[in-house]
Image (cartoon, rainbow, N blue to C red):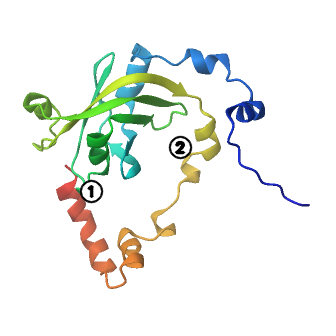
Amino acid sequence: MTSTRKKITCLDELLSLYGQPAKASLVKELDHIAPYYQLMIEKSPFAVLCTIGNGGLDCSPRGDEPGSIRVQNSKTLLLPDRRGNNRLDSLRNLIEDPRASLLFLIPGIGETLRVNGKATIIQDTELQKSFSVNNKIPVTLIEFTVEQIYFQCQKALVRSRLWEPDYKITREQLPSTGELVKSIQSDFDAKAYDAEYPERLKKTLY
């Protein structure tokens, strides 16, 4: 059988392949944080922050206790910028372009929550203190203004079986962090790095 390949570059052609969106998928989109959407945010311990800048796109994982991404009001979210590796990919992008997206996941729940809007980096002494953990205060906060918010149905997580215990991958099935670095930098001491990592993680988590 001969394979055929073509690029889809026309919106009309794309729509002819997929058809119109289901009515429910449009009704669920809001321009503010409704009570049920607020509950989903408050129950989520993990989100992915997507940004864009002159250097390109970036997706950054954000994980903390549920409710650490705070609903300030029906249009505003606050994210603490916890300690990281100081690449500052997301923050650099936000300096150049405020457009941003968030994808919230809740362990055991199939639906995800998608939020699009604009974000700015702020410092506010009292607000920063209110996000402190183990007496560690985030250097900055991200103030996220909601423009679109809607939940995504379960299909992707059902297909991926993400929350099913029998589908989890053990650490031994993948290279360690040190081994990953050594695959790029041959003289890197992977064993020493991996041995020191658990204690280093405790000290640098916040």
Residue positioned most to the bottom? 187
Residue 13 percent across, percent down from the top left: 74, 35
Residue 69 percent across, percent down from the top left: 30, 32
Which residue is labeled 2 in the image?
163
Residue 15 percent across, percent down from the top left: 72, 30
Q: Is residue 25 left or right of residue 105?
A: right
Residue positioned most to the front? 10
At x 50%, y 36%, the residue is 108
Q: Nearer the viewer, residue 53 or 164?
A: 53
Q: Nearer the viewer, residue 87 or 202?
A: 87
Rendered position, 109 above or below 134: above
Q: Nearer the viewer, residue 72 or 11?
A: 11
Q: Nearer the viewer, residue 17 or 169?
A: 17
Residue 59 percent across, percent down from the top left: 41, 47
Rendered position, 142 above or below 175: above
At x 51%, y 19%, the residue is 29
Q: Nearer the viewer, mark 1 or mark 2?
A: 1
Which comes before the other along the chain, label 1 or label 2?
Answer: 1
* Quarter of the view holding residue 142: top left
At x 21%, y 57%, the residue is 202
* Quarter of the view holding residue 96: top left
Instruction: Specify whether residue 68 is in view.
Output: no
Which residue is labeled 1 in the image?
87
Instruction: Specify whether residue 203 is in view.
Output: yes
Q: Amino acid at mark 2?
A: Trp
Q: Quadrant of the N terminus?
A: bottom right
Rendered position, 161 above or below 145: below
